[in-house]
């Protein structure tokens, strides 16, 4: 039996040594509680006449006791809350015990038994040390049902709601008032600053500072500032109809893509097409090529030597010719055909001293 | 049958009015315009034109073309050098240094000058002699190709260059150039036949910087690089015969947008504005669809282009297959107010594409048909787009405008016919300008002309139904499009010209109705009808006795005889009655349908079939009449003043569904400031279904009524509680809701109500403090963060409201206005204005609406004596470089300052701007504003009115504005407003009051000094002391006023000048020419000066003046002696004055002499030249022109 006690004592020390590894105060607390329970189990075993017990069986019993007590607590809490209280009463515990099949009547007799052992309060080994500097206010004392050896309540500010600011303003009027005056103040300050730092005009000859007007300065391109929405407004606009905007950019990209393809064929003409990337903002994707004369590539000058017709130029000329035929419209075909002919006869290698310039109005000699 | 050019013209003439008779002895078929160099730095243009011309008569030896301000280098006909002279009499209207300063004289001379070069009379500034080698060729009526090389240097009109002064290339700077002008002004930028009736096909070529785009009429055939690849040439072909006046050009670094709905439509705008362009033009295809549908006719051209440019001459200018718009019409999706305005402009220009560009006019007197039709179909588009209410409101507005204008100035004549050509028969003798030519018209008159034209077109529609109307249009269009596809030789092109008679004929063909009386009344005659109506109810007979009187004696009125619709709303319903207005019948008995008001509970049927409950307690118990309307459909151009009881007006306002009736009743209720009126107006204001414009005008009426009732009213200021209920927060009524302009109706109401409220006045005639605080709160709590739309117009109107609340300052002993004695309310207002104006510099609003309102408000504060009156601020905002709206607002303030403070300095500043500002629109606008708000008028004494000013203005209209018709007419208007028709009263009298009229051999009072009869009499009556000289003159000579006549033979020497030169261009006679000239042509009036007296083209009055001056010197002519007793009596009063002015006169005299000598010299020179040319005979030669055309071949002639 002494062995059991010894084991109990050893168990205590054993756990203590085990606790060395864990520095967590919460773990310490749990361990301390379990140790107390082990002491209880050991003393009960001693009472029941055991000389010694295996560690494993003590542990098992401890586990059972802990479960039992926990269950009493949990169940009692339920009964207590069932009757809309927060503090459990005796009857809650009684009902719980009855419910758990315990004969409550035997309890007083058992408590008064002669051979019972009294367990002393466990020594407080690791009192949580709170840094003094951070204490704010008085720590709350334990309520009567909590033994004093339990840890102290933490500082009140950590769990008590403290009104450190006024109620958040939800009053519409005040909000509007505030927004308005805030804006006005900002505007006033800004304009005053601008007026102070720049040239001003005044309505009063005698006082130029009370109502300073930023001097009127002419713009070089006045219509741009007048017509284009400011960046602020642009933002707003984007926010309001971003979906539409997306659609537009999509088609723009598409158009750009197409124009890039086109320009691959005739590099010289990319500038025109790129200037207007959004030209072909056609809704139906099928009809990509819009026949508009302003979208057509700019032709290169038609050069023709006086006496040497019929000479075909290099690839570029051919390219241009092909491109033209692809895009030629029927109604202007008759005008285009002679031009295409002239494409083939440009002698690029020869000095341009005098050449014929073919236009639809007739032949003209240029020097 | 082989047709030559002559026959069809003659045949047509025989047939009568239908065919078109060309005033020219040739027909233009094709023209090439090639501009191969445009220099933005120097603002110059170099190019050539080539006109293909078929003579229609043998012996054609001179060809007259139009050209102004162009420098002509060389003219070749069929590759042969041709001689030419260039004379532009409109450069300086009254040539010689004339002492004549009266407008009568000027207007006649100006009309004569315009006539002398009028293409519609076969005239032109440029006269080309056909080389003699070609005479035979011409006699065979073979084609002539006239090739003219020309250049333009710093053009002042016709072409407008916009070159911002920033860094970078011209394209980067956004430099652009475009053609502009009023009516046929194409001659300002290339030589042509500048007539709407001379159609031809076109080839247009423009070589521009590679980064630029040239937009012009017709199809862009191709774009070709020049050899150095730095420039591009745009080739345009216009195969539809078009008048030169409809040719246009715009060149600039434009961004190009192909219309996503119609690929043949292309839009152009200046760099960076593409997003705006996209939004603005996104609506255009619907307009196309609409017009094509109603006209059942495709758009006549194969393509359409819109170009948006800066510094526009007018907001909308329509040319063949392209329209030029002001860039300021562009807007983003956030702008509410501008959207309908811009759409209107687009629709207007498109209507003019059909009628005006595609279909052109035969002569100026047919202009009304085109303006009328395009205005009318534009109205139909308005009706469809904006609804019937908006349409009717617009018609009412236009009607009120034309009525007000005609009553003020005395009549707008749509179809002027000039029989006989005598000025005395002039149908527009009440006007200070001639209406014979579009170029002599006052701009305001022309706008009113257009307004009347479309109203009359609507009257025709009323008469023959819209269906027939559209059929007529369709007929005109289909005839024209058939003609347009024909070759020239078929002579069908004149089908593309519309004439009044042709139009009326197709109306009668299509509808079978006779509209002659209507045409006679409104088209051939000027004036509007003025009705006065009143009524009495005869209970015994149950008859409404209506009395309708007319005023047809006041200026601008005419008598109306014919049907007149009257609508009577009775208890039992609404009934239409058509009365016959006859000569003498004033009273009309109209039987009433409703017996009495037995069935009180019954609902009352309205005109539109609706039945409503009315509270009938207000009405007269004996009469079943609720209200009466005269001419509810506006089928007469009239003003109606109708008398009915206040409760009737109130019923009309509440229950009549026609917006025009509601508007009329609002106007009438102003005279009945009673609680009942107030209630009716408030109810209308609250009614959501009511048309927003009616509600807006109800606001202002309510303010007026509230002011009249101020002594008895105890409640809150009118409209305040209403506004609070509609637009303010429920919980805090002094705070306005955050902006949400999704409902446009309430947006407009929300904008307007505070403006009207600010007009409220309390018993002390001050704006109630409550109202001012209220408006200030609106501004303070304005919050647009959550809004989809911009609030710039709303904020601008809040500033307008602040300005409206300002009342005249209580001034103590004219103390100087300083900050210390500033009224506290004004201080608050000023605080807001300062903040707004400064914020605009940091975050500018669309079109700077807020700055505009602030400037106006500051002027109001100045004018009411709260702030020292000072134009410096406005002058700085009026500078070139500010947005045009700001400039106009600032200039308006300066004009007002000039008037109120009678500042000579500011007037000079304004006049200087009129002459030198780079923007034609601004110059025009200043003149316009000065005319509307003149610093003084003819009957007013003013320190500003002095001789220097007269001279300055005279110079301005005589020669200073020759490059812009509109500007010149504006100057004439101003001169008229300031000095009247006769000699300005501030001028010192010439030394001699009498002149000799040698022709009639009698002495008359110098016409230059006869005061205008009315003005003089008034003045004499009003302040007899101010103009004693007038009294003195008038008595002995009052009868001689009739003799005040300007000798038309001598009024304008330019005509003589031309004919003189033509005489010198030694010619065999052109028999066909005179035949082809209409009898009314001015040239018929002018005697051909024989070569003998060609060196004295001076005017006769002047000559006599000269004589008189000599007389006063030493030797007095016997004639002079004989008259002396008569003349000296009045003159003796002014000896002092005349001696004082002698010095300057002396100078003038000398100057004059000198000039004359010079002239003589010149003429001699030319004489010599004539001899020379005789010797050289057939050798081609060129003349040095007095204007700018300089000959290359004969440098010795250029003096």
Image (cartoon, coloured by chain):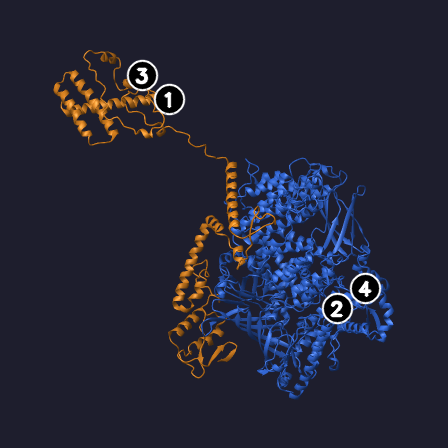
Chain colours: A orange, B blue
Task: Indicate the quadrant containing the N terminus of chain A: top left, top right, bottom left or bottom right.
Answer: top left
Q: Which residue is mark 4?
A: B1134
Q: Earlier in the sequence, mark 3 or mark 1?
A: 1
* Chain letter of disc 3 in the image: A
- Both labels 2 and 3 in a single chain: no
Residue B305: which quarter of the image? bottom right
- Residue B418 in view (yes/no): no
In the visual, does B966 lie left or right of A179?
right
- Both labels 4 and 1 in a single chain: no
Q: Are marks 4 and 1 in contact (CB under 8 Å)?
A: no
Question: Relative to the observer, which residue lies in front, B24 or B633?
Answer: B24
Residue B1129 % position (x, y): 86, 65
Dot 3, crowdedness within 10 Å: few (<14), some or many (≥20)? few
Q: Residue furthest bottom?
A: B1175
CA separation, marks 3 and 4? Answer: 133 Å
Q: Is residue B1050 above or below residue B762?
A: below
Residue B502's disc number: none
CA separation, marks 3 and 1? Answer: 15 Å
Q: Are marks 3 and 1 in contact (CB under 8 Å)?
A: no
SS category of the residue bearing label 1? loop
In the visual, does A190 lie left or right of B708?
left
CA separation, marks 1 and 2? Answer: 120 Å
Question: Relative to the observer, which residue lies in front, B914 or A200?
Answer: A200
Residue A90's disc number: 3
Q: Which residue is mark 2?
A: B1143
Residue B823 % position (x, y): 63, 42
């Amino acid at each position: 039996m002494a062995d059991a006690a010894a084991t109990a004592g050893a168990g205590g020390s054993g756990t203590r040594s085990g606790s060395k590894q864990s520095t967590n105060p919460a773990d310490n607390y749990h361990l301390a509680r379990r140790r107390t329970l082990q002491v209880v189990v050991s003393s009960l075993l001693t009472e029941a006449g055991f000389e010694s017990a295996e560690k494993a069986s003590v542990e098992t019993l401890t586990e059972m006791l802990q479960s039992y007590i926990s269950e009493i607590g949990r169940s009692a809490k339920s009964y207590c809350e069932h009757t809309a209280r927060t503090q459990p009463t005796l009857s809650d515990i009684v009902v719980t015990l009855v419910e758990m099949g315990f004969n409550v009547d035997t309890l007083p007799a058992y408590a008064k038994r002669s051979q019972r052992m009294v367990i002393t309060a466990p020594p407080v080994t690791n009192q949580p040390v709170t840094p003094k500097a951070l204490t704010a206010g008085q720590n709350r004392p334990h309520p009567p049902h909590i033994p004093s050896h339990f840890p102290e309540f933490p500082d009140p500010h950590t769990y008590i709601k403290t009104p450190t600011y006024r109620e958040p303003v939800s009053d519409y009027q005040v909000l509007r008032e505030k927004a308005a005056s805030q804006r006005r103040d900002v505007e006033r300050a800004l304009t005053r600053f601008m007026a102070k730092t720049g040239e001003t005009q005044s309505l009063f000859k005698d006082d130029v500072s009370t109502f300073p007007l930023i001097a009127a300065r002419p713009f070089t391109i006045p219509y741009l500032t007048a017509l284009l929405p400011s960046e602020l407004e642009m933002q707003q606009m984007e926010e309001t109809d971003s979906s539409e905007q997306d659609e537009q950019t999509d088609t723009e990209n598409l158009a750009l893509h197409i124009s890039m393809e086109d320009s691959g064929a005739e590099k010289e003409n990319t500038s025109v097409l790129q200037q207007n990337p959004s030209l072909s903002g056609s809704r139906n994707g099928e009809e990509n090529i819009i026949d508009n004369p302003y979208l057509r590539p700019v032709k290169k000058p038609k050069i023709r030597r006086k006496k040497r017709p019929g000479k075909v130029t290099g690839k570029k000329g051919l390219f241009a010719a092909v491109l033209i035929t692809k895009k030629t419209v029927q109604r202007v075909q008759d005008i285009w055909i002679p031009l295409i002919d002239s494409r083939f006869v440009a002698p690029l290698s020869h000095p341009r001293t005098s050449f014929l310039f073919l236009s639809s109005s007739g032949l003209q000699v240029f020097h | 049958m082989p047709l030559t050019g002559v026959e069809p013209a003659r045949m047509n003439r025989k047939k009568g009015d239908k065919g078109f008779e060309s005033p020219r002895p040739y027909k233009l078929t094709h023209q090439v315009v090639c501009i191969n160099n445009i220099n933005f730095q120097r603002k110059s243009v170099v190019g050539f034109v080539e006109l293909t011309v078929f003579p229609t008569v043998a012996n054609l030896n001179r060809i007259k073309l139009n050209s102004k301000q162009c420098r002509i280098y060389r003219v070749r006909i069929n590759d042969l050098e041709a001689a030419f002279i260039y004379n532009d009499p409109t450069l300086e209207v009254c040539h010689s240094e004339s002492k004549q300063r009266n407008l009568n004289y000027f207007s006649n001379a100006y009309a004569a000058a315009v006539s002398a070069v009028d293409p519609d009379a076969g005239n032109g500034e440029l006269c080309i002699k056909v080389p003699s080698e070609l005479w035979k060729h011409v006699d065979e009526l073979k084609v002539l190709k006239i090739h003219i090389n020309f250049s333009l240097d710093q053009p002042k009109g016709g072409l407008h260059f916009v070159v911002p002064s920033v860094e970078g290339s011209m394209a980067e700077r956004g430099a652009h150039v475009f053609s502009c002008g009023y009516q046929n002004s194409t001659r300002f930028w290339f030589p042509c036949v500048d007539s709407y009736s001379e159609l031809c096909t076109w080839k247009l070529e423009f070589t521009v910087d590679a980064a630029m785009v040239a937009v012009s009429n017709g199809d862009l055939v191709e774009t070709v690089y020049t050899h150095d690849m730095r420039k591009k040439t745009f080739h345009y072909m216009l195969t539809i015969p078009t008048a030169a006046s409809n040719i246009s050009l715009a060149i600039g670094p434009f961004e190009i947008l192909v219309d996503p709905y119609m690929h043949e439509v292309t839009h152009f705008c200046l760099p960076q504005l593409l997003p705006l362009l996209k939004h603005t033009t996104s609506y255009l295809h619907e307009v196309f669809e609409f017009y094509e549908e109603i006209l059942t006719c495709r758009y006549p051209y194969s393509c359409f282009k819109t170009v948006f440019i800066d510094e526009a001459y007018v907001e909308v200018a329509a040319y063949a297959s392209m329209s030029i718009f002001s860039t300021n019409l562009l807007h983003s999706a956030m702008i509410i107010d501008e959207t309908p305005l811009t759409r209107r402009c687009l629709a207007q220009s498109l209507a003019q594409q059909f009628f005006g560009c595609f279909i052109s006019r035969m002569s100026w007197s047919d202009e009304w048909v085109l303006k009328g039709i395009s205005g009318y179909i534009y109205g139909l588009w308005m009706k469809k787009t904006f609804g019937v209410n908006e349409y009717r409101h617009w018609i009412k507005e236009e009607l009120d405008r034309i009525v007000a204008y005609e009553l003020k100035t005395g009549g707008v004549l749509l179809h002027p016919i000039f029989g006989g050509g005598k000025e005395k028969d002039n149908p527009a003798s009440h006007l200070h300008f001639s209406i014979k030519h579009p170029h002599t018209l006052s701009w305001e008159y022309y706008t009113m002309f257009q307004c009347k034209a479309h109203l009359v077109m609507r009257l025709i529609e009323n008469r023959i139904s819209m269906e027939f109307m559209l059929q007529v249009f369709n007929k005109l269009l289909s005839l024209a499009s058939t003609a347009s596809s024909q070759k020239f030789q078929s002579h069908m092109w004149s089908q593309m010209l519309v004439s009044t008679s042709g139009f009326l004929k197709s109306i009668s063909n299509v509808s079978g109705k006779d509209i002659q009386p209507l045409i006679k009344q409104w088209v051939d005659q000027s004036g509007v009808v003025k009705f006065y109506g009143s009524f009495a109810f005869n209970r015994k007979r149950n008859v409404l006795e209506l009395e309708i009187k007319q005023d047809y004696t006041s200026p601008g009125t005419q008598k109306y005889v014919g049907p007149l619709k009257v609508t009577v709303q009775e208890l039992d319903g609404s009934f239409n009655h058509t009365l016959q207005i006859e000569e003498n019948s004033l009273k009309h008995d109209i039987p009433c349908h409703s017996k009495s008001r037995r069935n009180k509970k019954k609902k009352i049927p309205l005109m539109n079939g609706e039945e409503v409950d009315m509270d009938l307690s207000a009405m007269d118990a004996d009469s079943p009449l609720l209200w009466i309307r005269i001419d509810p459909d506006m089928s007469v151009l009239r003003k109606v003043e109708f008398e009915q009881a206040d409760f009737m007006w109130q019923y009309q306002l509440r229950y009549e569904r026609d917006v025009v009736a509601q508007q009329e009743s609002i106007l009438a209720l102003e005279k009945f400031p009673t609680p009942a009126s107030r209630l009716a107006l408030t109810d209308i204001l609250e009614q959501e279904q009511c048309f927003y414009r009616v509600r807006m005008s109800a606001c202002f009426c309510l303010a007026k009524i509230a002011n009249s009732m101020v002594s008895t009213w105890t409640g809150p200021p009118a409209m305040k509680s209403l506004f609070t209920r509609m637009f303010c927060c429920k919980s805090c009524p002094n705070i306005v809701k955050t902006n949400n302009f999704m409902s446009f109706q309430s947006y407009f109401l929300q904008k307007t109500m505070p403006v009207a409220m600010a007009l409220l006045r309390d018993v002390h005639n001050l704006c109630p403090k409550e109202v001012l605080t209220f408006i200030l709160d609106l501004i303070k709590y304005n919050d647009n963060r959550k809004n989809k739309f911009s609030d710039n117009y709303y904020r601008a109107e809040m500033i307008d409201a602040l300005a409206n609340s300002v009342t005249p300052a209580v001034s103590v002993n004219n103390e100087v206005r300083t900050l210390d004695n500033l009224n506290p309310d004004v201080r608050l207002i000023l605080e807001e204005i300062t903040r707004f104006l400064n914020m605009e510099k940091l975050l500018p609003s669309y079109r700077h609406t807020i700055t505009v309102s602030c400037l106006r408000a500051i002027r109001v504060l100045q004018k009411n004596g709260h702030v020292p009156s000072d134009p410096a601020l406005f002058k700085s905002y009026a500078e070139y470089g500010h947005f045009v709206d700001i400039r106009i607002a600032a200039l308006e303030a300066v004009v007002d300052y000039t008037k109120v403070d009678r500042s000579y300095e500011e007037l000079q500043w304004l006049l200087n701007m009129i002459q030198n500002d780079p923007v034609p629109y601004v110059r025009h606008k200043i003149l316009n504003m000065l005319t509307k708000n003149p610093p003084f008028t003819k009957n007013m004494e003013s320190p500003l009115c002095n001789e220097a000013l007269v001279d300055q203005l005279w110079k301005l209209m005589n020669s200073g504005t020759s490059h812009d018709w509109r500007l010149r007419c504006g100057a004439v208007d101003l001169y008229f407003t300031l000095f009247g028709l006769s000699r300005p009263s501030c001028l010192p009298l010439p030394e001699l009051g009498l002149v000799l009229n040698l022709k009639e051999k009698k002495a008359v009072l110098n016409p230059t000094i006869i005061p205008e009869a009315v003005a003089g009499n008034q003045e004499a009556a009003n302040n007899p002391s101010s103009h004693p000289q007038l009294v003195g003159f008038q008595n002995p000579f009052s009868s001689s006023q009739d003799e005040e006549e300007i000798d038309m033979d001598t009024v304008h020497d330019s005509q003589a000048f031309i004919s003189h030169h033509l005489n010198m261009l030694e010619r065999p006679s052109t028999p066909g020419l005179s035949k082809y000239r209409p009898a009314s042509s001015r040239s018929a009036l002018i005697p051909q000066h024989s070569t003998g007296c060609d060196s004295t083209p001076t005017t006769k009055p002047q000559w006599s003046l000269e004589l008189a001056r000599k007389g006063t010197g030493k030797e007095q002519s016997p004639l002079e002696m004989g008259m002396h007793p008569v003349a000296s009596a009045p003159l003796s009063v002014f000896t002092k004055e005349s001696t004082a002015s002698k010095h300057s006169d002396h100078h003038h005299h000398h100057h004059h002499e000198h000039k004359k000598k010079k002239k003589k010299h010149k003429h001699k020179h030319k004489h010599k030249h004539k001899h020379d040319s005789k010797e050289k005979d057939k050798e081609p030669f060129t003349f040095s022109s007095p204007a700018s055309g300089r000959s290359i071949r004969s440098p010795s002639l250029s003096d």
